[in-house]
Image (cartoon, helix red, strand yellow):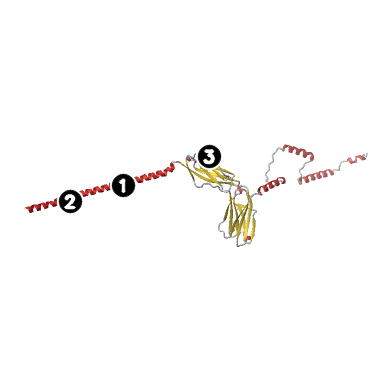
Amino acid sequence: MRALPGLRGLRGPPPLQLPLLLLCLLAAVRRSWADGNTTASPLTSLPIREEMMTKYSNLSLGSHNISLTASPLTTLPIQEEMMTKYSNLPLESHNITLTEHSSVPAEKNITLEQPSKIKLTCQFTTSGDVNSVNVTWRKGDEQLENYCINVTGNILYTQYMFTIINGKQMGSYSCFLEEEKEQRGTFNFRVPEVQGKHKPLITYVGDSTVLICKCQHCSPLNWTWYSSNGSIQVPVDVHVNDKYAINGTNANETRLKIMQLSEEDKGSYWCHAVFQLGESQERVELVVLSYLVPLKPFLGIAVEVIILVAIILFCEMYTQKKKMHTDDGKEFEQVEQLKSDDSNGVENNAPRHRKSESVSQ
């Protein structure tokens, strides 16, 4: 019995074709794993992925990487804002001149009140090879970079430019130029100094006094007063204690008025001036005396006068008494002399009488 012609195509594959198909499928899967493709079959991966996204959608994302670049959408406005903010800052240029024969480091003190652009230049003159000079810049112990070096003849110029916008950038910036001997130039940046009364302010119990602090050619953002008892500074609060009043006629001046003074108010008072780049302070010493204190020197003088008068009187009395004893002694001697003279006269007259009697006979 022969098979029907239309059923020949339904015959199964030969026995060797099935293992070959399995091997091809396994090779394809391994190749996808080697290429880093971890996607699963569309029939199973999509539901599993949706389930995982739904399950862990509320978890917070923790990242420990530091990115130094931002998206162009945020970086450009920030950079433009910074350039606009600091483009109008004033420029401060300062120079220091050094030579190979400089015996001491050169220093320059710079007072800075507000953020500024800074340009520091060190000029070094040598008779040797300028190109052999080693140049470094430092801020404290930190070595700086991005400085410029220029040579003209036997003069070397090194320049460092930066911007000071906060108090952490204040301090000392130094250029080191090393040939046979190292030369150093230092720029010291500091905020303006506050000036007070250097001598102690002397007042009396029950009076009122005013402590004054000034800042020449500057305008602090804020003034604060402190009183110190030993090493501890306590803020002066005018809202709590009515005996204090703080005012100032100008922004560069502050006044602390203390009323009804007592001996407990004596001590040191500090005025703090706050600037954009730091703080400055000054001490004012207050001395409170009682009214008996000025009398002490007069009392001492009076006691000395009394003692001196007593000594003079005692000396006068002693002198008078001694003189009286001397006069009494002289009178006694005169009396005795007279007595002796009288006795001698009687004795001399007796022989005379005898002679006269004998003559008369």
Give the CA distance from mark 2 to mark 3: 98 Å
Front disc: 2 or 3: 2
Residue at the far right in the pictured view: 1
Whether residue 124 appears in this view of the structure is yes
Check disc 1 and report its element: helix, strand or loop. helix
Query: What residue did someone put label 3 on?
Result: 244
Query: What residue did someone put label 2 on?
Result: 341
Check disc 3 and report its element: helix, strand or loop. strand
Residue 143, how many percent across, how many down?
A: 62, 52
Verify CB contact (< 8 Å) between mark 3 and mark 1.
no
Residue 129, how many percent across, how many down?
A: 62, 62
Sort mark 1 into few (<14), some (14-19) or many (20+) by Cα contacts within 10 Å: few
Q: Quadrant of the N terminus?
A: top right
Say which mark, if any, is on residue 172.
none
Whether residue 230 appears in this view of the structure is no
Amino acid type at image mark 1: Glu
* Residue 127 lies in quadrant: bottom right
Q: Is residue 313 left or right of residue 33?
A: left
Amino acid type at image mark 3: Tyr
Give the CA distance from mark 2 to mark 1: 37 Å
Q: Is residue 279 left or right of residue 358?
A: right
